Structures are given as C-alpha cells and as structure tokens.
Amino acid sequence: MPPRTSSPMPNSKPLPVTMDAVYTAPGYLFRRMQQIAVALFVEECRAFDLTPVQYAAMVAISTHPGIDATRLSAVIAFDRSTLGNVIERLEAKGFIERKPAREDKRVKLLHLTRAGAAMLRDIVPSVDKAQARMLQPLKPADRKALLTLLAQLVDLNNEASRVPLRAEDALEHLGKSG
Amino acid sequence: MPPRTSSPMPNSKPLPVTMDAVYTAPGYLFRRMQQIAVALFVEECRAFDLTPVQYAAMVAISTHPGIDATRLSAVIAFDRSTLGNVIERLEAKGFIERKPAREDKRVKLLHLTRAGAAMLRDIVPSVDKAQARMLQPLKPADRKALLTLLAQLVDLNNEASRVPLRAEDALEHLGKSG
DNA sequence: CCCACATTGTCAGTATGCTGTCAATCATCA
DNA sequence: TGATGATTGACAGCATACTGACAATGTGGG
C-alpha cells in the first residue's frame, strides 16, 4: 500500500484529482515498477556495463545471427530509431559487428563477436538474479499469478504498443544470410 | 502468451539464453507494459499536449500548492534532475508558476496557474479512459488481482528504486508557505 | 525500361531517467 | 562568529523512447 496523503487543512474547493488516484493508477505503477526493474538490473550487472535494452538486443542477435536492425526491432519490440543508437554502443564496446549485406546494399547484418558471446554467457546468472529479486517480495504463488497476468496483458495490448512485437513475421524472411 | 521463436535449424552449440527467457522475464514485461501505458495515455490526451509525467506533477502541485521541486520529486518518486526539465516545460506552457520563497533564497515554490487548474479539471476524464483501456483486455477479476499485486510489489520494492516514494516525509515540512 | 512506391538506416528534435558536479545558500556546532 | 557540512536548483553527460524526415536503395507495374 502506498503512503497516503492526509491533508491537514479541509479544502473549500474539491480538487479534481487526489494523489491517491495517481498512486493507484496502473500507468503510474507500471512506470515505477519499470524503474525499479532497471535499477535492480543495473545493480546486479554493474560489472558487465550492460543495460536491459542492450541485453535484450544481445540475446536476439545471439538467437538470430545475421539479423538486420529493422527485424531486430520487431523481434524485441523496441523502437527502430532508438535501436540504432543501442547497436552503435554495442559495436563500440566490441560486443557485436555490423556487416553490409551482399544482396541488399541498404541493410547491415548483425553478429555477436567472440567477446560478445563470452560476455553473454557470463552475464546470464546476474540477469536471472535481478529478475528474481524484483519479484522476491511477493509470495511464490503471487509471483506466478502476477507474471501470468502481466504476460497476458502485454500480449493482449500488443497492437496498442507503438512498436508491436512481431517475432514470427520478422523471422519468416530470415535464414538465407547467416 | 508471446509468440514463440521456433528455430528451424538444430543448433550444434546450445545458446546461453533463448528469446523465450526474455519474453517471460518480469523486467522485459514491465518495460513493454510501461511503453503501452504511455502510448495509450498520449493517445487519449493528445488534445491536451500533456505527458504522463507532466500530469503526475500537475496533480501533486494541485494537491500541495507551494511545494518545491525537491519535495515534489519525493511525492511522485521522480528523479530530481529530470523534474527540473518537466517543471520548465510546464511553466513554458503556462500551466504552473515558479516563485522564489521569502525565507529560503534557494527554493522556488510551485503553484498552478488558472489555466493549469482549468486544464487539470478537463483532462481527468481522458486520463481515466487511458488507465481503463490498458487493463480492458483482462477480465474484471483479473484486473483487480493484477492491480493489487502490482501495488504491493511497487510498495515492497520502494527502497530498491533510485528515487523512493517519500510522500509522508516530504509533506511533514510543508504547510507554512502556501 | 522507367516511374511510383516501399524499405533501410540515419538523423534531428523532443521528453524522460539517471549520475555526477557545481555555486549559492542555509543550518549547525565548536 | 566562523568554519563545516547539508540542501537546493541548475547543469553536463549518457541512455532510452518516440516522431518525423531524409537519402540511398530495392521492387513492381505499366
């Protein structure tokens, strides 16, 4: 339960909204929880200098070597413009490589470097620890219930997202250049 | 349920992580849900040109007229540096005023303008619609269950956040300058 | 074959979100 | 009182997010 704002002075004019309405709004709670999730991830993975977004991109490139930026965007449901900068940073850290495609001069294919693959292997336990920590305060049954409902809700709202998840579509056209 | 990545080619070396692990990780789901929440908020409130963060700040200033930026940060659990820019934009839009405090030359007190108060009254139905829409896909009982667990989890993880919610503390010192 | 359209990566611009740092100011204590 | 440390707002720097635009390129229809 979030702390409640108890106004000591009675108000003459009723306010249109209370802080309690904000504290219990799903949008506010999702924002706070996302920030908590990032904070725990960064804390657990400090030694690897990797953000949650960069981690998701690394996993996707690992799973689908030779993917291009646009399809990567669809596979992890991240904005295409944002992803450009993410890829740039991963390349600067030496974790991935960008190689021009032979058949299509527009696209640049993404591959993990040896160092990137090694880092990915090493970071997994820390990531798992962070994911476990953010649900830790709940009882095991509640953790499962929340996770199930959350996964359902994200999936059902997929089209409402600015960048819907399109894992299947993105992979259909893959497989010839790897 | 998120779409599953079915690799057509059997892998010789087992990968350290699968996309499925990413899709079901709480951190990934919270990020996606937060982005969906923002998208729905912006869509419903397009006519008011107000972001979720700006809205929360407006409500807090409305509830606590004469609050300063540091206490506002604690009341809505937003980063103090970020809040500076948010306040600047709200002031530029003419929704709030910043007035120097007489007792303490460092602080600037925040008040809604008449236009800001009017806007806040008008935007509330749109905000409520957005909040309802993001839970809409779930059955009513599931909505309640998710919201309860989410509120619990955010509260229990409060200290893990970079900017913990400190509504009570922040308000203790308020009330003399309004 | 050429033109209209789509796709790809990139960039500019805006808005969070966080880490630091800094000067001005305040509060406290020796 | 005077030095010390804390607080406040501001700022620089990095990393998401999203919008809209753009040039280069690819694709298909006429």
Image (cartoon, coloured by chain):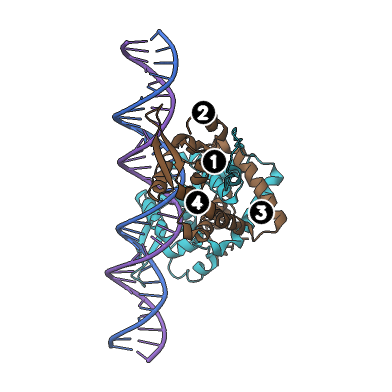
Chain colours: A cyan, B brown, C blue, D purple
Q: Amino acid at mark 2?
A: His
C-alpha gap between disc 3 and disc 4: 40 Å
Q: Position of residue B159 (x, y in %)?
A: 56, 35
Q: Which residue is mark 1?
A: B63
Q: Nearer the viewer, mark 3 or mark 4?
A: 4
Discs 2 and 4 share one subunit: yes
What is the CA distance from the residue labelled 3 to the residue labelled 2?
Answer: 42 Å
Q: Position of residue B88 (x, y in %)?
A: 38, 45
User: Distance from label 4 to label 1 (Cα)?
Assistant: 14 Å
Secondary element under disc 2, as helix, strand or loop, is loop
Residue that mark 4 sits on: B118
Callout in the foreground (3, 2): 2
Label 4 vs label 1, nearer the camera: 4
Q: Residue at x 40, y 51 (%)?
A: B93
CB within 8 Å, label 4 to label 1: no
Q: Residues within 10 Å of mark 3 (few under 14, many from 20)?
A: some
Quadrant of the frame with the C terminus of chain A:
bottom left
Q: Nearer the viewer, residue B98 or A113?
A: B98
Task: Say which of marks 1 and 3 sits in front.
Answer: 1
Amino acid type, callout 4: Ala
Tell me: residue A10, above or below residue B148: above
